[in-house]
Amino acid sequence: MSGPDLLSAGDERLAPRSAVRRLMARPELGALVGAVAVFLFFAVVTSTFLTPGALGTVLYSASTIGIMAVPVALLMIGGEFDLSAGVLVTTAALASSMVSYQFTAVTWVGVGVSLVVTLGIGLFNGWVLTRTRLPSFIVTLGTFLMLTGANLGVTQLVDGTVATKSIADMQGYRSCAWLFAGSFTVGGLTVRATVWWWLGLVLVAGWLLLRTRFGNWVFAVGGDADAARAVGVPVGRTKIALYLGVALCAWILGQHLLFSFDTVQSGEGVGNELIYIVAAVIGGCLITGGYGSAAGSALGAAIFGMTSKGIVYAQWDPDWFKFFLGAMLLLATLLNSWVRRRAEHG
Amino acid sequence: MTAPPPPLLELSGIGKNYGSVLALRDVGLVVEAGSISCVLGDNGAGKSTLIKVVAGLHAHDTGSYRISGEEVHLSSPRQALDRGIATVYQDLAVVPLMPVWRNFFLGSELQRGRGPTARLDVAAMRATTREALLRMGIDLRDVDQPIGTLSGGERQCTAIARAVHFGAKVLVLDEPTAALGVKQSGVVLKYVAAARDQGLGVVLITHNPHHAYLVGDRFLLLKRGRMAGSHTRAEITLEQLTAEMAGGSELAELSHELRRAGVVPADPGEGTEPTT
């Protein structure tokens, strides 16, 4: 009945499950195919897409979405949404700018206070969610509206206009700008700091998801929270940690916004939360949780970057961008569900 | 002169109230190592309440609960687990989209390294999962496949193997065959027997006397929260068990009524057995 010989027999039966099948089972497959297709498409129809200047712009555009798509994807795998992610970026930038301007003349203080404020809001989201057991759609819709109002209201109150005052002449501005908004050029290709942040986040998130106990818990709380609780997974703490991840990345992107322009428009960020979610879904995240990948979210963000800039290079009306995106989202979701069904029951 | 070791589990005179509802009254249950105790009863007989008391989900109100001779008053499933009592519920507590090996170790993951470099020991977990399943006689094609792709019987067996692997001394199975077909039920019962042969004490909750009699050593019948019968295998036949389970005299009355109405043939015992 049993014995070591069965082990090898089991392995032999494995051979027919081909490498193709394993590839099909990866969540980011659809996004990879889509990214390659979009890249080839714009490389062919435009003459400028493959120039270093254009590629640098595309990379930058992808990175500003990708930095947030990574934690939003992890949160979706954990079974929750964060509709406040877009305006939270603006809140992080505003907090940093105002604290620096009003209380000190050192930008690093503002950057530090902003981190505390942003993480506090993430903690609030996660804590309210786990304590009240309300759906995350409602909880974060609430914080989304509150933050949207507070961003405008507080800026109006403090600065009297819709934008913050310039902090460009403050101590520490140059080092902050280097860290969050710097760039360097190799062979005509300008790589902005956000690209490094983005790649770093994707690598860390991928490692966390697939190779740590925390990652195992993220898949479990999104896949079946009750089952996870029954075997001793701390469901509440895992979800709170995921909201803190979103807040941390919102802080990074917020500092980038501030230090690349030295002032912040308080109405920015509204609508971006949906772009992050779409990037995560195109990257293979299941809307119901329990399935997805960090690399997929990066591919989703890359598709966004290539499309938004490619349409400009192709000299089309940029209004078509959203249309294209909607079609992309539908296609990706269909492809994902088809691939998953094949992988599960093929 | 030493006394024989106390049974793994010994419940006597157990009572449990939910407000004014008496869910259990004066129920006793003994589970010995290497034996299977079956708890039989219809819906609402108190099987779930008994399982919750044993698993530590609810504390009992009256009576005594001894684990290996030691009187306990459990107030959480963790306490039961720490004493070696593992419960496999009907929904199995598995995450369908996750691979078999990730499910097997969920909540008790093996790690390498310390602090920020702590990471999953994937190779060890894969190998251990395959070995633990093989030891139970379950030969899986691929421990990387999502557990949702396994059949109901395979999932049940994996959940049992998980409990055995993590050092359970007593295995509590809540209706393991309820949602399964005939063949799959047989497979699951085989693994229940395999767990018993490894020296575990098993509590098998079921409403199917046929399944219980195939593997059981003791039978506890519950009815409306009370013990309606407690037998060892030597004391009772399958027919008696079935009759008692279905309510003895009530069953005789029912079959009489059905016969009068012409719903069943004159002697229902005759037609069901093949005559070879």
Image (cartoon, helix red, strand yellow):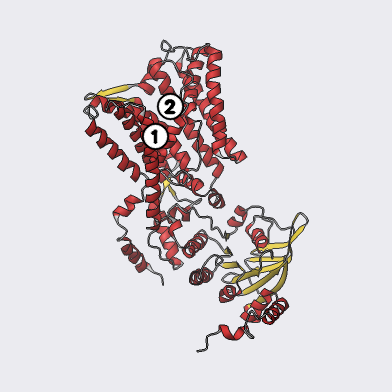
The percent position of residue B127, horizontal first and vertical second, equals 39, 58
Please tell me how many numbered marks the rendered image carries.
2
Q: Is residue A212 above or below residue B36?
A: above
**Residue occupying the point 68% across, 71% down:** B221
Q: Residues within 10 Å of mark 1 (few under 14, many from 20)?
A: many
Question: Residue A252 — which label?
Answer: 2
Q: Are marks 2 and 1 in contact (CB under 8 Å)?
A: yes
The three-letter code of the residue at mark 2 reads Ile
The residue nearer to you, when weighing A17 against B132, is A17
Q: Quadrant of the N terminus of chain A?
A: bottom left
Residues marked 2 and 1, same chain: yes
In the figure, is residue A316 to the left or right of B15?
left
The percent position of residue A19, horizontal first and vertical second, equals 29, 54
Q: Residue furthest right?
A: B20
Chain letter of the residue beneath label 1 in the structure image: A
**Which quarter of the picture shows residue A36?**
top left
Q: Measure the C-alpha gap from mark 2 to mark 1.
A: 11 Å
**Residue occupying the point 41% across, 61% down:** B130
**Which quarter of the picture shows residue A166?**
top left
- Residue A335 in view here: yes
**Residue occupying the point 25% across, 37% down:** A40
Question: Residue A201 — which label?
Answer: 1
The percent position of residue B93, horizontal first and vertical second, equals 53, 55
The three-letter code of the residue at mark 1 reads Leu
- Residue B6 in view here: no
Q: Earlier in the sequence, mark 2 or mark 1?
A: 1
